[in-house]
Image: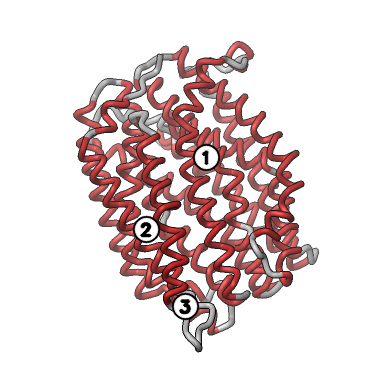
């Protein structure tokens, strides 16, 4: 295979399903890890050069940031499904319309967020009970990121389009370039310019604009697959409705999860700055541990979409089984590595021994949940690729609203004692791992029932 062949779209309707999935997933996994480095580097830099409170501020901003950016996750998922199915069906016209529709909707959505959300950020942080010691930093960090939404949203959407075409290598290369830029600018802005939390936010949006421009340039050089001109950059009702129908359930799924995190965040804030900082460390490491699950899920979405478009359902079921088994094995290996070296990872973020120990204890509670999440993401990825984005949404809604939030408050209240008047903070991790296990069981049951096959959504 020649080097330039790595940048060509992968046709997943032929060849070994497991081979297709792994070949597509590996560069995407590396890309997801690089994506996670954005926030992780931010946390390491502010934790080491500004202090534990700055680390807590960056982390406490996360759930609120994710809530408003979930719209783009939905559009990205919808884009990947539409593009992969049209590509699998060899339908050039549908492919061109899908890509133009995604670009238009991303622009409109980005402008709305850039104008409206910065105005309500501080009241929302106050509503969540963010400690006074960190609220100014959290507000500053969020406002800068929201004003730079255009770059991050276009990278996510254009990356979704490239993955739908079977090209996970190009998105990876552009993201690695952006990650390098982000890391260098983080250090320069904080260490030498003294910009603190604002510096890491500025570094992030600059790097994301670079990755978005590179992704757009790549698409403009793929005209052998689709047409990319003004005719397809018009607002078309039917493709827009289909994109929303496919993507919004996924976006709502993530938004619901973010809302549940916000509700739990208000409970988290009652345990003080040290627990908030420890929770930030866990979330950053957790982001890397989760990457194989998300990557296998995304790979199975593209694999399923292409094979549904080609009407190869036999390959869909075979690929789902093989991909899920490989994913679970990967998660088991990661869990063992975390048990052996997790404490060393926590120490990268802070020099405070109490924070390191608390973070490691929290992480160990979550270990079984990562294997469960692998099952959930893989099977949900297949459902998404087949056009059934509603079933995963209902599972997430049930888990986040009916199980996670009430369970977190219940366990914390049951653990209150004279020595722990606020309750045991580790109960929050126990509530999370129980939620993940229930979610995996529900997803497996509904996948095996075959309900998703009755909702196949094919390109028109």
The location of residue 328, given as percent across then percent down, is 27, 54
What's the CA distance linking mark 1 and mark 2? 22 Å
In the rendered view, tell whether residue 97 sits above or below residue 117. above
Viewer-nearest residue: 439 or 330: 439
> Residue placed at 23% from the left, 45% from the top?
445
Q: Nearer the viewer, mark 1 or mark 2?
A: 2
> Residue placed at 48% from the left, 64% from the top?
285
Mark 2 neighbour density, 10 Å: few (under 14) some (14–19) many (20 or more): many
Q: Which residue is mark 1?
A: 73
| Dots 1, 2 in contact, CB < 8 A | no
Under tag 3, what secondary structure? Answer: loop
Q: Which residue is mark 3?
A: 424
> Residue placed at 69% from the left, 46% from the top?
146
Under tag 2, what secondary structure? Answer: helix
- Mark 1 or mark 2: whose residue is earlier in sequence: 1
Q: Nearer the viewer, mark 1 or mark 3?
A: 3
- Mark 1 or mark 3: whose residue is earlier in sequence: 1
| Dots 1, 3 in contact, CB < 8 A | no
Mark 1 neighbour density, 10 Å: few (under 14) some (14–19) many (20 or more): many
Q: Quadrant of the C terminus?
A: top left
Quarter where residue 237 is shown: top right
In the rendered view, tell whether residue 55 sits above or below residue 320. below
């Amino acid at each position: 295979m020649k080097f330039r062949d790595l940048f060509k779209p992968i046709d997943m309707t032929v060849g070994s399903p497991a081979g297709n999935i792994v070949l597509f997933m590996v560069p995407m996994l590396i890309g997801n890890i690089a994506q996670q480095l954005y926030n992780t580097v931010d946390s390491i830099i502010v934790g080491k050069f500004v202090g534990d409170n700055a680390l807590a501020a960056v982390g406490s901003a996360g759930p609120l940031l994710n809530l408003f950016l979930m719209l783009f996750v939905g559009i990205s998922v919808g884009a990947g499904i539409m593009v992969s199915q049209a590509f699998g069906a060899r339908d050039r016209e549908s492919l061109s319309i899908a890509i133009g529709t995604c670009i238009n909707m991303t622009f409109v959505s980005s402008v709305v967020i850039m104008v409206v959300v910065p105005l309500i950020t501080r009241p929302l942080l106050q509503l969540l009970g963010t400690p006074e010691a960190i609220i100014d930093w959290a507000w500053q960090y969020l406002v800068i990121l929201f004003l730079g939404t255009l770059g991050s949203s276009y990278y996510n959407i254009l990356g979704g389009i490239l993955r739908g075409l079977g090209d996970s290598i190009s998105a990876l290369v552009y993201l690695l370039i952006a990650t390098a830029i982000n890391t260098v600018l983080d250090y320069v802005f904080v260490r030498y310019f003294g910009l603190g939390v604002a510096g890491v936010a500025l570094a992030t949006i600059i790097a994301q604009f670079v990755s978005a421009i590179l992704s757009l340039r790549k698409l403009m050089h793929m005209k052998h697959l689709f047409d990319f001109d003004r005719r397809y950059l018009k607002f078309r009702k039917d493709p827009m409705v289909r994109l929303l129908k496919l993507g919004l359930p996924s976006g709502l799924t993530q938004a619901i999860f973010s809302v549940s995190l916000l509700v739990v965040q208000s409970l988290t804030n009652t345990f003080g700055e040290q627990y908030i900082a420890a929770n930030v460390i866990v979330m950053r490491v957790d982001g890397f541990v989760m990457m194989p699950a998300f990557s296998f899920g995304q790979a199975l979405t593209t694999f399923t979409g292409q094979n549904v478009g080609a009407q190869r359902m036999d390959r869909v079921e075979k690929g789902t089984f093989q991909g899920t088994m490989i994913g679970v094995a990967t998660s088991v290996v990661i869990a063992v590595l975390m048990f052996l070296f997790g404490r060393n990872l926590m120490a990268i973020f802070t020099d405070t021994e109490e924070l390191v120990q608390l973070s490691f204890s929290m992480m160990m509670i979550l270990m079984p949940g990562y294997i469960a999440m692998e099952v959930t993401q893989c099977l949900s990825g297949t459902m998404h690729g087949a056009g059934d984005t509603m079933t995963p949404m209902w599972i997430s809604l049930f888990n986040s609203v009916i199980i996670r939030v009430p369970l977190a408050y219940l366990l914390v209240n049951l653990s209150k004692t004279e020595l722990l008047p606020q309750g045991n903070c580790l109960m929050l991790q126990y509530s999370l791992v129980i939620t993940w296990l229930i979610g995996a069981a529900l997803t497996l049951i509904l996948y095996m029932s075959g309900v998703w096959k009755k909702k196949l959504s094919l390109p028109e």
